[in-house]
Image: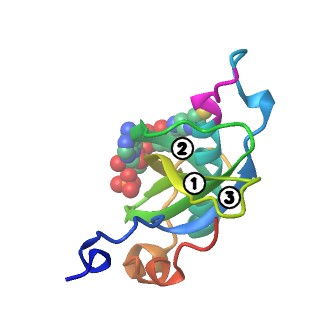
Amino acid sequence: MTDKETQAPAEEPAGRLILRTLAMPENTNPQGDMFGGWILGQMDLGGAILARELARGRVVTVAIDKMSFIAPVNVGDIVCCYGRCVHVGHTSLKIHLEIWVKKLEDANAVRRKVTEAGFTYVAIDDDGKKRLLPESLRNGWDGTAERAAGPGIC
Ligand SMILES: CC(C)(COP(=O)(O)OP(=O)(O)OC[C@H]1O[C@@H](n2cnc3c(N)ncnc32)[C@H](O)[C@@H]1OP(=O)(O)O)[C@@H](O)C(=O)NCCC(=O)NCCS
């Protein structure tokens, strides 16, 4: 067996690319370290976009779980948010989100995962009260379409 055959396959982002942005100096503390809250905000934004598409309307974030920061984000990194729906309930759905980064300036840079978490969103009506998710989503969702979509670029 060659070395290549024994190597574990490189980890890939889970889900599809929802959001892409650039880490800027205004999102750092005076020492130049990126705020975790900014990263969390990007994830919530990305998750809300996907949740809103699936829920076909207004959603609110109700819970965030298992948030872990694996590696730092630096100014100048391309910040990519990937997401996939992992649970559909009656009024709520859970999105697994990952942030991967890559150096903007380096054409050969490899992307690396910096954080992941589960975000739960609840579908709400015009009065801010919970509403049932679309029937097609509650009855028809099995994750197949999202897995087939692949991760996209970073
Ligand atoms: C979202 C909200 C409308 C839900 O109202 P509610 O009538 O109390 O809803 P319930 O407790 O019955 O929960 C509704 C769904 O959310 C789920 N849920 C509620 N709290 C949850 C939590 N902490 N973790 C995971 N799921 C949760 C429930 O399991 C339920 O799911 P299901 O219908 O798919 O089975 C209400 O809690 C709310 O307005 N929260 C504030 C949301 C907000 O402002 N977010 C932004 C913060 S800045």
Mark 2 residue type: Thr
According to the picture, the residue beneath numbered tag 1 turns out to be: 47
Q: Are marks 2 and 1 in contact (CB under 8 Å)?
A: yes
* Residue 123 visible in the shown view: no
**SS for dot 3:** strand
Q: CA distance from mark 1 to mark 3?
A: 9 Å
- Splitting the image into four quadrants, where does ligand 1 fall? top left
Please tell me which residue is depicted at 40% across the width and 76% down the height of the picture: 143
Q: Amino acid at mark 3?
A: Leu
Q: Position of residue 79 (x, y in %)?
A: 66, 50
Residue interval drawn in magenta? 32-38
Task: Kindly identify the amino acid type of the residue bearing the numbered disc 1.
Answer: Gly
- What residue lies at 48% left-to-right and 64% top-to-bottom? 13
Q: Quadrant of residue 44?
A: top right
> Which percent across, then down, holds residue 133?
49, 65
Residue indicated by mark 3: 19
In the picture of the structure, the residue carrying the numbered disc 2 is 61
